[in-house]
Amino acid sequence: MKTAYLYVRVSTDEQKRKGYSLPEQEDRLLKYCEYNNIAVKGIYREDYSAKNFNRPEWKKLIATVRSKPKEEKNILFIKWDRFSRNTEYAYEMIGMLRKYKTTAMAIDQPIDFSVPESTVMLAVYLSVPESENSRRAMNTANGIRRAKQMGRYPSRAPMGFINLTTVDGKKIIAPKQPEAGIIRWVFHQLAKNVHRVEDVRKMADGRGLKCSQSHFFRLIRNPVYCGLIPIKLNSQEQHMVKGIHDPLISEALFYEVQRIITTRRKVTAKKDDLKAMFFLKGTLVCPLCKRNICGSFSQGKTKRYPYYHCYGRCKTRINAPFLNDRYQRKLQQMVLSGNAVDLFNRILEDWNTNTQKAEYLQERNMVVRRLNEQESILSQGRKLFVAAILKLDDYTELKSECRAKSKCLKRELSNINVKLRNIDKQGQLGNGPFVDIFQGFPGLDTADRKHLASLIPPLKVDFQTGDISLDLNGALSKILLTKRKAKKQ
């Protein structure tokens, strides 16, 4: 009696287009073996693409074949497209099977390898599936190109965006928090040209943007973030189309960052360290000779010490970290006045946060209702499947579609919840009698510290004790108070 191993394979798209299913193929092969008096030694079921032979079940089948090199064996399948959809790999695999005395055969497309002319039919059987794959890939590429020309982003959403489906079934991308906010912050930091790109990546990682170095460099070069979608004309040229999605940054900011990251940096790491340490430089004046105070490191016996100092003969100087700390403490004693808090609350009311919150709540209720509908559909399908009314293939397809829609809806729900939390945080601004707006000063980067020091410079500095006072102009003096004065109010 002859023996054979049965191999059945489907891919998701083929199940939908041609109605292939694993049970149907298996049933036909078993009937064929029974009619031809062939003993079945094993059945291998696969749910994988046939573009190559890197398939789990096929690897198991080959391992079984190799374990019996002297025994003549047969592998049966329905058609040659179940075996392979790549002519080159198919011929290579057929040659390898011959070494192990194994014959591959399609019951619907039989080939007699003892007849030389039959190889012509084999070439036809193998080339037709490959041409189908090539045509399908071409149609897919054309569809993606047409979608991009219409301003849609049909591929997987880049970091900071999520894929959504509109009510009319169109695929779109929308900002996803908190990643979108961090990426916006990244572009603004790069535009300042203060830190190296790798330093900005590490700071973004600390804020929660988990991204490898190579991925980060691709991210900051992606024009999708400024609302543009690239379309390749050839291997070297491409043109941009205005996308229908909401951009995270402006086009001007994006191209400014591209100019900076493609230009050789003039700011070295050493200069970055100097700027970070001496951010008060340019705002300090020597109390004796009235010259501008500079900053540098003094070499000690074991290490270097940073000092703010005067280049004149008066030799005025003070430890830089000590003065920086005194400035920070003085700054953190300032809070918003009650009138300023009231003004900001009115601005928030004018922004109509209550109306926007109501809209988000309505959207969330709609998404929750659609999620419940998907769960109900899946539950009904499960009952029909248990009652043998719904076939396995139909139930599997239904379950896959419900899960895909539910996953998309859950992402949309998460995005809405983030927006609602942001509105609640904004509404909590005036809950206290005053607001500490400088408590986050230690987390500011060097450029922001220097900018803040230029807005609120130190007015009187005692280079002996480190006592310091701040110079508040007319406008700032009306909205900033010390905590002691704010409590009295």
Image: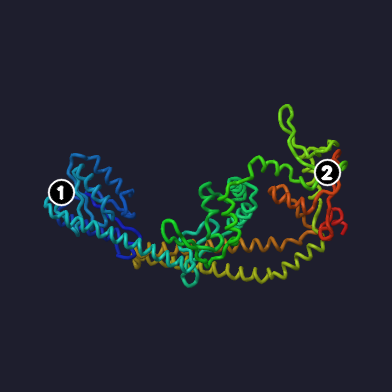
Labelled disc at residue 41: none
Determine whether, in the image, residue 102 is placed left or right of residue 298.
Answer: left
Labelled disc at residue 2: 1
- Whether residue 382 can be seen here: no
Q: Contact (CB < 8 A) between labels 1 and 2? A: no
Count residues near mark 1 (Cα–Cα under 10 Å), then give few for <14, some for 14-19, many for 20+: few
Under tag 1, what secondary structure?
strand
**Of the pair 198 and 397, the residue shown nearer to us:** 198
- Whether residue 312 can be seen here: yes
Determine whether, in the image, residue 398 is placed left or right of residue 489.
Answer: left
The residue most toward the left is 115
Determine whether, in the image, residue 294 is placed left or right of residue 85.
Answer: right
Residue 165 position, x and y percent, is 49, 67
Determine whether, in the image, residue 146 is placed left or right of residue 432.
Answer: left
- Which comes sooner in the sequence, label 1 or label 2? 1
Residue 160 position, x and y percent, is 55, 57
Q: In this view, does 232 lie above or below 102?
A: below
Q: How is the image coloured?
A: rainbow
Q: In this view, does 57 lie above or below 411?
A: above
Q: Which residue is drawn at 77% across and 37% down?
A: 307
The residue most toward the front is 312
Residue 348 location, quadrant? bottom right
Q: Residue at x 51, y 47 (%)?
A: 214
Q: Of circles 1 and 2, which is in front?
A: 2
Q: Name the residue under label 2.
A: 291
